[in-house]
Structure formats: structure tokens, C-alpha cells
Image: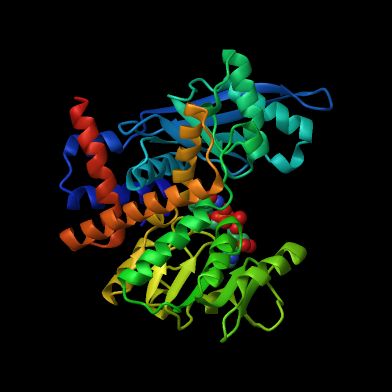
Amino acid sequence: MDANPLSTALHSLRQAAELADLDPKVIELLSVPKRTMEFTFPMRMDDGNVRIFTAYRVHWCDALGGFKDGTRFTENLTLDELKALALWMTIKHGVGGIPAGGGKGGVIVNPQELSEWELERLSRSFMRHLPIKGAWVDVPGADIGTSEKTQAWMLDEYESIVGFHSPAAINDKPTEVSGTFGTDEATGLGVYYIFEQAVKDFGFANDCSVVVQGFGKVGSVLARKLTEGGYKVLAVSDVYGGIYSADGIDCVKLNEYFLKTGSVVDYSGTEPIANKNLLEMEVDVLIPAAVQSVIHDQNASQVKAKMIIEAANGPVTPEAEEELQKRNVPVVPDVAANVGGAIVCHFERIQGLTDEYWDLERVRNQLKEWITRAYDQMTATAKEKNSSLRMAAWMNALRKIEASAKKRGWV
Ligand code: NAD
């Protein structure tokens, strides 16, 4: 299959739509974005020169609610990738029961080359020139190259434009600027809640063994929770390499080492292991939490894990999933496993709209409730339709979108 991310997303859409017996008009509606915005804006740099920046925002489908999700400041920004991500977010919101549509956007820029003042002006300029925005229309969050700092500037700019307090217009803000607690841990913690549910469901022992690839924002939170939960983390890796211990790694202590050294490599009491070998280890559960397409047609037959949970986006290629399915290795798909971040973004919006702010415990409890519900709905559909978990998650989202589109009279 074509490696273009939009083709991959549309392929999953058509496969799931067929299984769900979706109305052809809904498939047509979901195969194209509602709108694509490409715009440019001038910005004065610190040296006095003016530079013209190109920016995008894609709105896929808003049958379930206003558009929402990330903003990338990166040089590697293509419209096709943004479209694929906006479609995926539309589905992810459906899977998570989040009343929102899928949006994605960004600016072509290398943020490392900008001074702090330039980064602030860029965030504000993006917000000023973004053609459609607001709490009930499109709520941009952070993503690659953006952070709670850029989101605070965007909110401040937006509120200056409209002239009133509107905290729900931007997501991923600091708590001091009407953000929510729990943003940093949301995705990793959500994967952990899904893991707990899945190991129970598939009959693994309470102390089953786990391997985690990636020790970043998602992987490090997840690995720490696994240690705290009493699971045996046999191996962990990052881009520099992996570490292994037959007795299990204490990932809470490993995190302290990681914060000092910037890598998991050479952590005491462990042996080195290459990323390639880590993916092929004898283990109960393998959790890729790094980058896409790490399990593919060339290595899928070597994967010995009894279950895979996709913490990263798209770590298992469709060809690899076919091979794993033949061997009855369940793959808990990304759209369900890593939906925790999107769920907590929705909580941030609720708090902004009501101006009533939650404590961390409430965020965690609500996250567990929402993500467990999404998991239960997915497994129920997989049983009913005798499908993969991925197709079940997609079907659930598509049915919700179809029901809304029909009642609205769109199709
Ligand atoms: P991150 O950049 O914080 O961490 C990525 C980790 O993967 C790092 O430890 C890095 O060293 C490691 N890594 C990179 N390339 C690797 C390679 N080739 N082999 C092994 N390890 C490698 O990223 P993150 O935010 O933790 O995101 C991880 C994945 O989860 C991505 O696929 C991302 O799209 C997805 N995701 C993240 C979030 C979120 O809230 N951060 C939400 C949904 C999905």
C-alpha cells in the first residue's frame, strides 16, 4: 500500500465503513475535508527583516462537534499529512465519545531557529491570521513544536482580538492560564488504563511481562505506571538504544536516571538490547510508544509478544497486522489506546466553558471512566462483528458520526 498517510487513513476508513455497512453518502462525506485553509502572514524578525510564513488548518468533519486538536510548528509540514491527522482525530474523538470534530494545522517553520520573542510573535500572528477560530468552532491545541507556552500566547492574542475572557478557545494551556491539570500525563496514563483493562480481558497474570519502546512523554509515564502497578517491565528503549533485565526494570528509578542523562541507555543493573531485538522479545505485552511503522511486513513474523498495545500512532503497519491476526495476536489500536490526551483536552474545554476548574484526582478519575468506556465499546463491537479491535473502534466512531449526520439531515 502507498505510504502516504492520507491514503492509509482513507484505506482504514473504507475498510471499517464496509464492515459497518455505512451509508455510501456518509463515506463520501468522510472521504474529504470540510475545509482546508492555507494562509500566509508576514512577521518582522529580530533583525528587522520581514519573513512570510505559510500556515494551514484542516477541518475534517464536525458532525460530532466543533473542530479540535493540534498545531504543529515544524519544517516538515505537508497538507496530506495534516489531512490524514485531521481524519484520524475525527475518528479518535468518535472512539473516545468526545463531542468534537477533527482539526489539525500548523506553520512551516523551524522553531529552533527562532528567538523567544520571535516564537511569541509567531504564535500570536498564527492566531491573528487563523481565519476561523473560537471555543465553539475550532480549538487549536499543542503538538510538535508547540507547548503550553505557545498556547498561552495564542489564548492571550485571541482574547485581545475578541475583547473578552474565553479560556475554552485554546487547549493545552498552563494551569495558571485556565488550563487543566493532568495534560502532561494524559496519554501515557490513558494507555496504562487501557493496558489494565486489556490484560484482565485477555486473561494475563497480574504480574505479566511488558516491553515498552520509547521513553518520551507517553512511554515514560506509562513505564512508571507499569512499575507502580506491579508489572514486570523487561525492556525499555529510546532512540539511542534499549535496556533489558530479566528481573524487571524499576521504571520510577529509571526515570530519575533519564532526567539526569537524557537517555535510558547504560542504566545500572541492565543489559543493552537493540531496538530491533526488543521488538522481537518473548514477552506478554509489547507496547510501541515511539514512532510509526516499527512493526512491519519484514519483522511481524518475528514478533513473539502475545498482545500489542499501540501507544504510538500507527506503529503496526496494515501488512504486519494481517500477519499478527493470523497468529491471533490482538492489537489494541492507537485510536483507542492513546485517546487519553484527546479526552483530557475535552476536559480542559469543559473547564474553560464553565470556568470551574478540577483537581488532578478528578481529571484522573474521569479519564479512567471515559477511556474504559471506549475500550468496552470497542471490545463489544469486535465480538459482535468478529472483527479486529482496530476495525471495531473505527466502526463505533463511524456509526456515531453517521447517526449524527443523518439526524442533522446531511445525508
Ligand atoms: P516523544 O518525542 O516525547 O518521545 C518519543 C520517544 O521515542 C523518545 O524516547 C525517543 O527517543 C524515542 N524514539 C524516537 N525514535 C525512535 C526509534 N526509531 N526507535 C526507538 N525509539 C525511538 O514523543 P511522545 O509524545 O511520547 O509520542 C510518542 C508517540 O505517541 C508518537 O507516535 C505520537 O504521535 C504518539 N502520541 C503522542 C501523544 C501525546 O500526547 N504526546 C498523543 C497521542 C499519540
Determine whether 242 is above or below 182 in the image: below
| Quadrant containing ligand 1 | bottom right
Which residue is pictured at 57% across the width and 14% down the height? 162
Q: Quadrant of residue 375?
A: bottom left
* Residue 186 locus on image (x, y percent): 52, 51
Q: Is residue 248 visible?
A: yes
Q: Residue furthest top?
A: 163
Give the quarter of the figure containing the C terminus.
top left
Instruction: Looking at the picture, tell me which residue is in the foreground, 190 or 296.
Output: 190
* Residue 325 locus on image (x, y percent): 29, 71
Instruction: Looking at the picture, tell me which residue is in the foreground, 194 or 76.
Output: 194
Q: Is residue 23 left or right of residue 158?
A: left
* Residue 9 locus on image (x, y percent): 36, 48
Give the quarter of the figure containing the N terminus.
bottom left
Q: Is residue 73 left or right of residue 377?
A: right
Q: How is the image coloured?
A: rainbow
Which residue is pictured at 19% across the width and 25% down the height? 409
Q: Is residue 396 left or right of residue 68?
A: left
* Residue 237 locus on image (x, y percent): 60, 71
